[in-house]
Image: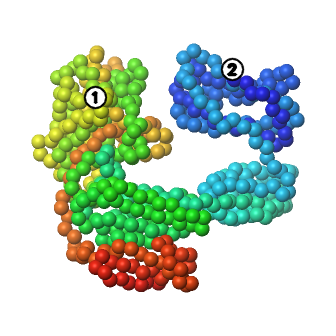
Amino acid sequence: MATSPAIEIREYSQLEFYCYASGIYLVWGAWKLYAIADGTSTLLLDQFQWAQDNGYDGPSWEKYTVDLADYAGKNVQFSFVYTGDYGEDEAIDGFKIKQANTGDDATINIKEGESVHFLDASTGNVTSWNWAFEGGTPASSTEQNPVVTYNKAGNYTVTLTVGDGNSTNTATREAYVNVTGESPTANIDLPDGAYQSPWVMMFVPTNVPLTFKDASTGNPSQWVWTFQGTDITTSYEQNPTVTYTQEGNYGIRLEVFNDLGSNVYETVDNAIQAGGEQEIWNIAPEENSNLMMMEMGLYGNYAGTNWLGIGEFAEHFDAPLADATISKVNIYFGKTTAASANADINVSIATAGDDEMPGEILGTTSLKASQLAYDPTTVNATEFVFDNPVEIKAGTEFFAVVGPFPNANGDDIAILLYRRNEGEKCTGFHFVYDEDENYNYLETGRWYKNNDNPISMAISPLLKYSAVTAINTIDTSKQAVSHTYYNIAGMASSKPFKGVNIVVTRYNDGTQTATKIIN
């Protein structure tokens, strides 16, 4: 039990807090939240019942809000009572009482990108609602209590017109929503067709145009990109398109600006590999330190030994932008206990069929279960090498397929993976065998995408781009080495001014140019 001190509850108050828990364990242990006032304890919220009602399986941070209208004017203690012997630890944070300001001078104060849940307070027999939200998304709504997001700083008016079928009435609050801006934070998203890798930030082909995506937050209004090894060394576009002209490892820099400040995203010089050969996978750099095994209790492991009739597992990869070959597939295991030491573990490269599931097999190799590599002290891949490199044509999506795994008594094999929240990126697939009337597994079955538990497995083909010849010869001997910006008053800066600029660009051959730009 955890009980708060007595808190005076005012009108229009709500209780708010956050909790982190695994939904699967709530049947064995969960909390109930009580309000204690005037010597009486009243149940406010039952965590297990809430999880049932909302289809929660977690684990994730969830926000809980409880209306306290029945307790206005009272001194109340709040008590969490946890019952059960087999549940797991839970975390509760951000516990607070909020009071709404309903006065005529009330304002809503938020930051860019935040949302407001508007509540209708109209009286009478209202049957229709027409909201207008200046600066909001959506800009209008016919819901009674809509949620609106504000993405740009400013002071915005809200209007509500209600009707009862015979007449209407309108209320307007000027400058009701005050949205404050913030200085931007620079960030770069992967270009379409770029691969993630265990060893570099991204892997791209040469002589193929790539559009880099600005993923900055804070509503930047200006962008300065600096590239290495490309046909364009500097760009002021939000999402520039460039081409890497020769194989190598390069860095990238993005500086973003708005009226409140600037921020820089800069990589090390070897962050981007253009051309050549590299391992690829579907796990982001910020995710690869949190690889795990998905253990299913008595049923074994997802992506490994199991007793659920799951035979093979497949990791989906986007199509390469240029012709490529795969000479081997590296797989990172979390455990490799193999009582069936001589069982074959097969790995194949397959194209995507019309149903977007693994289709035609392009190449297969195998190892014995006893040959799987695992070292708890270091990153150690098991290498499945093909007799001949598998060819992947540009524009062809493909899968790396592994399995089946042995499941005799004593077998315990599992591939490492990264698990995401429902609705997020999923590249993991599995093949489930059909059953006969006696629940025996047949040789037939079908593929499924694991949308219920979105994951990416630590399966990493070694992909090599075929040489691509540029259509046009690009002169890389003349490159910009610096840019100086001058405003109309003659002041100089290394960054663009707001308004009219004369930018002087100096090149590595000693020449320079002057260009007028307007920001």
Q: Residues within 10 Å of mark 1 (few under 14, many from 20)?
A: few
Callouts 1 and 2 close, C-beta under 8 Å: no
Q: Is residue 170 left or right of residue 387?
A: right
Looking at marks 1 and 2 on the same chain, the residue that comes earlier in the sequence is marked by 2
Q: Mark 1 falls on what kind of element?
A: loop
Amino acid tagged 1: Asp
Residue beneath disc 2:
1
Residue beneath disc 1:
375
Q: x, y (%) of residue 109?
A: 72, 55
The residue shown at (47%, 64%) is 255
Amino acid tagged 2: Met
Placement of 311 over or under 231, stated as above or below: above
Q: x, y (%) of residue 438?
A: 34, 19
Q: x, y (%) of residue 311?
A: 29, 30
Placement of 390 over or under 78, stated as above or below: below
The residue shown at (83%, 50%) is 102
Q: Which image quadrant is residue 348 in? A: top left
